């Protein structure tokens, strides 16, 4: 019998599964393709934890796979010793369907092992989970969330004792413990839980967290000066930011805050949102309606777990335009540096961090302001590592960390991207520019005037289904076998294979280490400074592509972006125009 059918039968025969799950399994008994989809493989537990569609099966998110994952964590903490068990684990969740159920099951498994648990009383932003690990001195943290994925998904994010997601070594060991645990017989039952080991985390920690966020204001005076004329529209996209973010914005002095009421109630079905993702303009449709009614120039949206943030701003023609993640990262860096310099508060040992797939404009910004810039692999755990290393050495003043996918981090209290502090900083920055008669779109244009034209294009190809992983792997191998001589008419001078951890100078043939951890990423640098990057997603069945282009003016930057995109399509054997976000 095929392995997936064996696993299916194991589930069907178990007396541990509930009646609803058994009925779901019986309903697919004659559908081999569906059985293979659910049981053909296990969810991969990486540094980001687990993420998949919800449903019955070992390759799906459900109370059994969640309990098995938590059992792996519990065994890892037991190996560390009693101190880790006493420090405990903090557990949070977002607004997704089944998130509270999964959160509770995690607590049951951990307490059955005698591990202390801090349990958020209800949904909270992801950065609060990271901050909670650090504040309570926990050994680990779990957040039940699938971030910005569609409604049928859920996930399990693991955090380690520094508040960041774990290193590959730790994640691999937890994964080993998970996969050597029988999903039914090796996991404690609900009756074995010890509720006396649970501490509920509620409003008191809300206040502590908000105080830490408020300490990260850069230029507090500008809010008061601009408050009468500054209108802000906010939406949490039916997620965890619904309470904390508006409260923070009110506390910094935003007088005219308007919410998108139909999206202010947490709802795991995300009504009207095919993708509850602030990277996509479609997510702002309801916000634009409100902004039009109240004559606001800016709309802010968090994703459902409130670690990402996106905005739309009105241009001089009255049209709303998206500010991209790269543009916002550059705006925040320039604003923070400029505001501190104006106040005579700019530290001499300042440093910032961005990912290798993010815009190169921050390089120019940091150079002008004498700020050290660190480039890291995609993922905030790598940004957190740099911050941790500086803190350990007692060196440097951390200014900002960001990645192009709408994630920003500021301050020492959290080790993950933070949509709460980002919302506060964006409003503060909007006030700063409004006092100068500028919209956020004007501010973006002013960056180009100061630092040159940097433009980016990103695209993705989904490869779902049973052979999705194989297709992604084959495409990446094809790119590795390709050594383009030029990209868009400019000679390729450097090819980096981050899986092999090599950087090749194509002019000399010299190969040196990348100096970064191993990752399945290909990076091509042209002589004109344009960059093409390919990277499979770690959480979704897709491969992502990044074009980082520049030019002497807007026209040439646009032309280079298009030419680089065409060059990438040629490398992939795709028709021009195929790679559109």
Image (cartoon, helix red, strand yellow):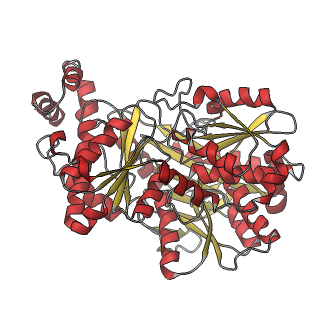
Q: Is residue 117 left or right of residue 561?
A: left
Locate residue 369 relative to residue 201 in the image: left or right: right
Percent position of residue 553, x then y:
83, 54
What's the residue at 11%, 42% (across, down)? 185
Numbered label tally: 0
Q: Does 238 appear above or below 502? A: above
Give the image quarter of residue 57: top left
Up-down relation of residue 360 to residue 94 (above or below): below
Residue for point 18% across, 23% down: 19
Q: Is residue 526 left or right of residue 38?
A: right
Asked whether 389 or 526 is in front, the reply is: 389
Residue at 56 percent of width and 40 percent of height: 243
579, above or below 500, in the image = above
**Residue 505, relative to residue 296: is it above or below?**
below
> Toward the viewer: 58 or 525?
58
Figure quadrant of the C terminus: top right
Residue 194's x, y, as percent?
21, 48
Residue 384 seen anywhere in this rendered image of the structure:
yes
Seen at 52% across and 76% down, the residue is 390
Q: Position of residue 216 (x, y in %)?
A: 64, 62
Front-most of 85 and 305?
85
- Could you tell me if residue 481 is visible in this image? no
Location of residue 398 in the rendering, given as x and y in whole percent from the top left corner: 60, 70
Horizontally, residue 395 falls left or right of residue 81, namely right
Which quadrant does the N terminus fall into? Answer: top left
Which residue reaches farthest right?
A: 437
């Amino acid at each position: 019998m095929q392995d997936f059918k064996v696993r299916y039968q194991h589930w069907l025969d178990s007396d541990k599964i509930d009646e609803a799950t058994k009925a779901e399994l019986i309903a697919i008994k004659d559908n081999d393709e569906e059985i293979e989809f659910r049981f053909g493989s296990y969810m991969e537990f990486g540094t980001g934890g687990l993420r998949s569609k919800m449903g019955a099966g070992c390759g799906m998110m459900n109370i059994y796979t969640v309990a098995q994952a938590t059992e792996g964590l519990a065994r890892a903490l037991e190996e560390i010793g009693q101190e880790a068990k006493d420090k405990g684990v903090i557990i949070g969740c977002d607004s997704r369907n089944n998130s509270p159920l999964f959160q509770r099951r995690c607590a049951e498994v951990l307490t059955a092992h005698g591990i202390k648990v801090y349990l958020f009383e209800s949904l909270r932003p992801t950065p609060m989970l990271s901050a909670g690990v650090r504040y309570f001195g926990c050994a680990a943290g779990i957040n039940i969330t699938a971030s910005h994925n569609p409604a049928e998904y859920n996930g399990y994010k693991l955090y380690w004792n520094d508040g960041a997601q774990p290193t590959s070594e730790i994640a691999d060991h937890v994964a080993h413990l998970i996969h050597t645990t029988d999903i039914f017989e090796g996991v404690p039952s609900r009756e074995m839980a010890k509720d006396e080991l649970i501490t509920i985390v509620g409003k008191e920690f809300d206040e502590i967290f908000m105080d830490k966020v408020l300490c990260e204001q850069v230029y507090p005076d500008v809010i008061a000066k601009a408050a009468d004329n500054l209108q802000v529209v906010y939406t949490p996209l039916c997620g965890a930011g619904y309470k904390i973010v508006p409260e923070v914005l009110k506390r910094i002095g935003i007088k005219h805050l308007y919410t998108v009421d139909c999206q202010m109630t947490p709802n795991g079905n995300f009504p009207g949102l095919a993708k509850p993702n602030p990277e996509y303009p479609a997510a702002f449709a309801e916000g634009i309606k409100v902004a039009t009614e109240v004559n606001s120039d800016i709309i802010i949206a968090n994703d459902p777990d409130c670690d990402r943030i996106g905005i739309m701003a009105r241009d001089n023609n009255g049209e709303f335009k998206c500010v991209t993640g790269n543009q916002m990262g550059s705006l925040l860096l320039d604003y923070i540096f400029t505001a501190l310099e104006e106040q005579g508060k700019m530290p001499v040992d300042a440093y910032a961090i961005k990912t290798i797939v993010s815009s190169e404009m921050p390089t120019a910004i940091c150079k002008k302001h004498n700020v050290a810039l660190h480039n890291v692999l995609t993922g905030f755990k790598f940004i957190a590592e740099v911050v941790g290393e500086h803190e350990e050495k007692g060196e440097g003043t951390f200014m900002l960390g960001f990645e192009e996918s709408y994630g920003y981090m500021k301050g020492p209290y959290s080790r993950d991207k933070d949509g709460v502090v980002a919302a506060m900083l964006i409003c503060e920055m909007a006030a700063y520019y409004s006092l100068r008669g500028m919209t956020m779109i004007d501010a973006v244009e002013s960056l180009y005037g100061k630092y040159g034209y940097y433009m980016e294009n990103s695209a993705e190809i989904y490869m779902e289904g049973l052979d999705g992983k194989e297709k992604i792997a084959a495409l990446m191998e094809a790119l590795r076998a390709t050594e383009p001589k030029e990209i868009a008419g400019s000679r390729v001078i450097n090819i980096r294979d981050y899986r092999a951890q090599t950087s090749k100078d194509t002019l000399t043939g010299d190969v040196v280490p990348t100096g970064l951890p191993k990752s399945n990423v290909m990076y091509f640098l042209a002589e004109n400074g344009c960059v093409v990057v390919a990277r499979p997603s770690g959480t979704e069945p897709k491969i992502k592509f990044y074009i980082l282009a520049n030019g002497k003016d807007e026209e040439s930057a646009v032309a280079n972006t298009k030419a680089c995109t065409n060059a990438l399509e040629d490398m992939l054997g795709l028709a021009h125009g195929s790679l559109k976000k």
